[in-house]
Image: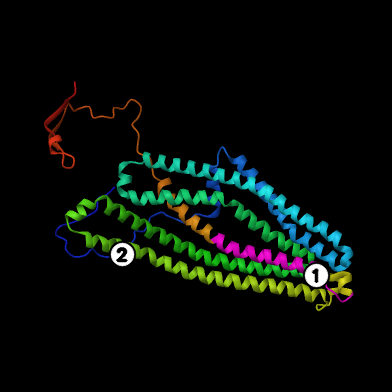
């Protein structure tokens, strides 16, 4: 680790530092994260596949809940009190579907998180091996505090990504499933939902591309801040002896201020994104319910065909209205969740990219078989004028006038 540069003659405060740009650090794609997950899940890949299947089946059971509940409402509407027993059976199936969902979700999550622990362990071992195999010159060019920060960021990012697969699977099923269900209820409503949620998803990706670039800037500033803290605290005796405390405190403050620059940008972007997504998702589910009601009432000229006998009789099946409402709410809720999780995914991509300099570190050259590591010409090693004392224990100090090792 490089020492903190201090000078007794330098009385003026240090210049404002700029966080160093990291050469070769690039954003990683989602495909790279999945390749890393699959690579480091070696030995536990079968468990990962089992977890995916359990979680997928769990979400399919949940997807059936609005349809079951809607049928119960339809029986109550059409049969009155006589339809209560049939509606009760449908409601019983609603509860059974929720129970089945949790019976599958729990074991799936346990398997998934155990695999995530294995992934983090293997990635950590790989990075430690690369660091210990790297030549001393590499370590001299990379601050130990920065290297520690990179390792912690990247291992935690891949671990978090590995244990969050149920979120992406759940959101996929709960977005695609409701749109398909809306299409089956009414092709017009399904088409409007597909276009509307597609546009909202596009807006989310636009926001998060910008936020991911800001996250990379923040990571660089954080590493510079962490490296400065390690330097100062590791050389605190030199700082105090040279009376450089005030200058060093300003240096730390400036490094921290450099972190706040991209962080403030991220805060503004985050609030703007959430406002836009929430307003658009709420407006869309209102539009979907209105479109279905108008279609069922024959406003578009084909309501009777869409609404069936109920529409022809001048009524609208409340169960189907409930289905449209619930499925549009589910899809809207998923869009909002995607806005949050896609932001986390963008951060994971930026954090995992921090491992690139560690993964690309070339190992130190090893001597060929039979090559003598030590120089063959030396005969004597001498150590002179050594005095070692610890604290105030002057009486126990070790003094050596001269120590020699002779090679024979």
Q: Residues within 10 Å of mark 2 (few under 14, many from 20)?
A: some
- Magenta region's main secondary structure? helix
The part of the image, by quadrant, that contains residue 319 is bottom right
Q: Which label was assigned to residue 352?
A: none
Mark 1, secondary structure of its residue:
helix
- The residue positioned 74% from the left and 55% from the top of the image is 95
Q: Quadrant of residue 67?
A: bottom right
Which x, y percent locates residue 353?
A: 46, 53
**Is residue 213 one of those drawn in magenta?**
no
**Marks 2, 1: nearer the viewer:** 1
Measured along the vertical axis of the image, is residue 293 above or below residue 223?
A: below
Which residues lie in the magenta part? 313-342
Compare marks 2 and 1 and give the one earlier in the sequence: 2
Where does label 2 land, which residue?
254
Residue wearing tag 1: 318
> Residue lying furthest left in this view?
401
Crowd around label 1: few <14 · some 14–19 · many ≥20 (10 Å): some
Is 310 positioned to the left or the right of 385 in the image?
Answer: right
Q: Is residue 322 magenta?
A: yes
Q: Is residue 74 above or below residue 139?
A: below
């Amino acid at each position: 680790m490089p020492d903190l540069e201090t000078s007794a003659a330098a009385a003026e405060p240090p210049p404002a530092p700029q966080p160093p740009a990291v050469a070769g650090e690039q954003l990683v794609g989602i495909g790279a994260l999945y390749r890393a997950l699959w690579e480091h899940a070696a030995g536990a890949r079968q468990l990962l596949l089992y977890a995916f299947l359990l979680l997928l089946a769990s979400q399919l059971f949940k997807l059936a809940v609005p349809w079951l509940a809607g049928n119960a409402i339809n029986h109550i509407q059409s049969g009155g009190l006589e339809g209560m027993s049939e509606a009760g059976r449908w409601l019983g199936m609603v509860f059974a579907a929720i129970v089945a969902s949790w019976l599958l979700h729990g074991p799936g999550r346990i398997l998934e998180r155990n695999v995530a622990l294995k992934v983090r362990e293997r990635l950590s071992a790989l990075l430690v091996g690369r660091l210990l195999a790297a030549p001393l010159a590499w370590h001299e060019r990379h601050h130990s505090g920065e290297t520690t920060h990179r390792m912690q960021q990247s291992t935690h990012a891949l671990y978090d990504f590995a244990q969050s697969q149920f979120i992406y699977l759940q959101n996929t099923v709960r977005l695609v499933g409701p749109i398909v269900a809306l299409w089956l209820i009414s092709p017009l409503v399904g088409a409007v939902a597909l276009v509307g949620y597609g546009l909202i998803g596009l807006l989310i990706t636009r926001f998060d591309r910008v936020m991911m670039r800001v996250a990379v800037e923040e990571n660089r500033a954080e590493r510079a801040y962490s490296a400065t803290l390690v330097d100062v605290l590791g050389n605190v005796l030199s700082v105090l002896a040279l009376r450089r405390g005030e200058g060093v405190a300003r240096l730390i403050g400036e490094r921290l201020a450099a972190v706040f620059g991209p962080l403030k940008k991220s805060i503004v972007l985050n609030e703007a994104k959430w406002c836009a997504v929430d307003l658009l998702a709420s407006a869309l589910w209102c539009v979907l319910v209105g479109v279905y009601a108008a279609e069922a009432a024959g406003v578009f000229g084909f309501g009777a065909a869409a609404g069936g006998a109920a529409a022809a009789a001048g009524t609208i099946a409340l169960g189907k209205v409930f289905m449209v409402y619930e499925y549009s709410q589910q899809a809207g809720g998923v869009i909002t969740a995607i806005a949050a999780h896609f932001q986390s995914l963008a951060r994971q991509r930026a954090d995992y990219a921090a491992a690139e300099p560690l993964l690309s570190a070339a190992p130190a050259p090893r001597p060929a078989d039979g090559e003598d590591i030590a120089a063959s010409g030396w005969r004597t090693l001498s150590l002179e004028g050594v005095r070692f004392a610890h604290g105030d224990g002057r009486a126990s100090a070790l003094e050596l006038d001269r120590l020699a090792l002779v090679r024979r």
